[in-house]
Image: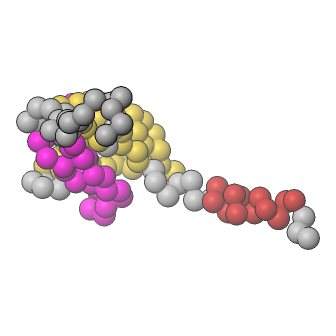
Amino acid sequence: MKPWWYLSLPLLSCAGNAQANPVYLSPTHCVTTQLTCELPISLTWKFEHPTSFCLIKESDSSNLYCHNGATSGQVTIQLQYNKSEQLMVVDSKTGLQIQQFTLKVMVPNNALRKRKRHAWSIL
């Protein structure tokens, strides 16, 4: 039989990977009945060293937000899009991709099938 602390080793090994995703984006989904989706996006980052980065829309390579040399922070950006978009966080100095996000647009399907019988009917 293994000791009780043996079971906690996988948890401790995952704690070292906490810096794997230094940038977070929320929300990543938008449910709308309109043609476009407009909502505030919160971008949060925490790096070990001061890092300059840009948030880029992949479809047209436009910079949505750039930040110079901070280890941590948060900003809210107002975005408007009409289809699912890929966003990338890129290191400004090296051009390397730090993280990639997908903003998904979902349109509810209101054409649900109506019941042909009463709910209390046995047929």
Q: Please report the residue visible at 27 percent of the width from the left and 52 percent of the height from the top.
A: 102
Vertical side of 118 occupied by 69: above or below: below
Q: Is residue 17 left or right of residue 68?
A: right
Residue furthest front in the image: 123
Looking at the magenta stretch, what is its main secondary structure?
strand
Vertical side of 58 occupied by 66: above or below: above
Q: Nearer the viewer, residue 17 or 68?
A: 17
Q: x, y percentage for residue 111?
A: 15, 38
Q: Please report the residue visible at 24 percent of the width from the left and 47 percent of the height from the top.
A: 104
Is 79 one of the magenta-colored residues? yes
Q: Is residue 31 left or right of residue 74?
A: left
Q: x, y percentage for residue 97?
A: 31, 61
Q: Nearer the viewer, residue 36 or 96?
A: 36
Residue furthest bottom in the image: 1
Vertical side of 84 occupied by 72: above or below: above
Q: x, y percentage for residue 99?
A: 35, 56
The N terminus lies in which quarter of the figure? bottom right
Q: Please report the residue visible at 50 percent of the width from the left and 58 percent of the height from the top.
A: 20
The C terminus lies in which quarter of the figure? top left
Q: Quadrant of residue 116?
A: top left
Q: Quadrant of residue 67?
A: top left
Q: Which residues are magenta?
A: 77-106
Q: x, y percentage for residue 93?
A: 29, 57
Q: Nearer the viewer, residue 46 or 6?
A: 6
